[in-house]
């Protein structure tokens, strides 16, 4: 079983250092951003979403703790957003540390997310997943997430 523990400022700084670079690389891999601009665009995205770090209003950042181990096994970040049709949770990031993958912690963390979202009286969780992330897409599908929008691309040779 896992529990979601509010992220400390120190944990946030470590997360941010990794996440900005990782997010930039994911966008380059997906063909959305050029390698030259990716880092800058990623930094802008994080500054826009988290201007006050862990204290940013409506942003919820957690470490994922495996209770049986008493150890941190990953992190989870979601926001409460006002959208047409009412407020919803948007899952920005979930990461399970490499040493703890394929042990069910991701599934348990997503179930813990559902409980947090229900506590906030929200009835919908949305997320984005890159098309090339087949393992994440499989977990989301297993837990009942459905595709609500799909963007396809075909790269043409010059």
Image: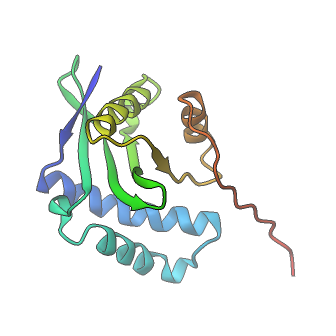
For the C terminus, which image quadrant? bottom right
Indicate left or right for 53 with 81 as reference: left
Residue 24 or 60: which is nearer the viewer? 60
Picture coordinates of residue 128, whole percent (x, y): 53, 54
Picture coordinates of residue 120, whole percent (x, y): 27, 42
Residue 109 or 42: which is nearer the viewer? 109
- Residue that protrudes farthest toward the front in the picture: 85
Looking at the rendering, which quadrant does residue 48 occupy?
bottom left
For image coordinates 23% across by 72% down, the residue present is 51
For image coordinates 24% across by 44% down, the residue present is 62
For the N terminus, which image quadrant? top left
Residue 96 or 152: which is nearer the viewer? 152
Indicate left or right for 97 with 120 as reference: right
Picture coordinates of residue 125, whole percent (x, y): 45, 44
For image coordinates 56% across by 31% down, the residue present is 144
Residue 151 sits above or below residue 78 on the image: below
Residue 62 or 87: which is nearer the viewer? 87
Number of numbered discs present? 0
Looking at the rendering, which quadrant does residue 79 occupy?
bottom left
Picture coordinates of residue 63, whole percent (x, y): 24, 41
For image coordinates 81% across by 66% down, the residue present is 154
Indicate left or right for 141 with 75 as reference: right
- Residue that protrudes farthest toward the top in the picture: 68
Residue 14 sits above or below residue 25 on the image: above
> What colour scheme governs how the chains and residues are painted in the rendered image of this protein?
rainbow
């Amino acid at each position: 079983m896992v529990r979601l523990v509010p992220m400390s400022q120190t944990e946030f700084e470590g997360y941010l250092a990794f996440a900005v670079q990782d997010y930039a690389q994911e966008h380059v891999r997906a063909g959305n951003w050029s390698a030259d601009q990716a880092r800058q665009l990623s930094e802008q995205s994080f500054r826009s979403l988290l201007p006050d770090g862990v204290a940013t209003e409506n942003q919820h950042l957690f470490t994922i703790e495996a209770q049986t181990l008493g150890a941190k096994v990953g992190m989870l970040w979601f926001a409460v957003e006002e959208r047409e049709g009412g407020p919803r949770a948007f899952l920005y990031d979930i990461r399970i540390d490499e040493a703890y993958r394929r042990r069910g912690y991701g599934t348990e963390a997503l179930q813990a997310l559902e409980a947090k979202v229900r506590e906030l009286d929200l009835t919908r969780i949305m997320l984005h997943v890159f098309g090339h992330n087949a393992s994440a897409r499989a977990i989301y599908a297993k837990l009942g997430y459905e595709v609500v929008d799909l963007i396809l691309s075909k790269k043409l040779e010059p």
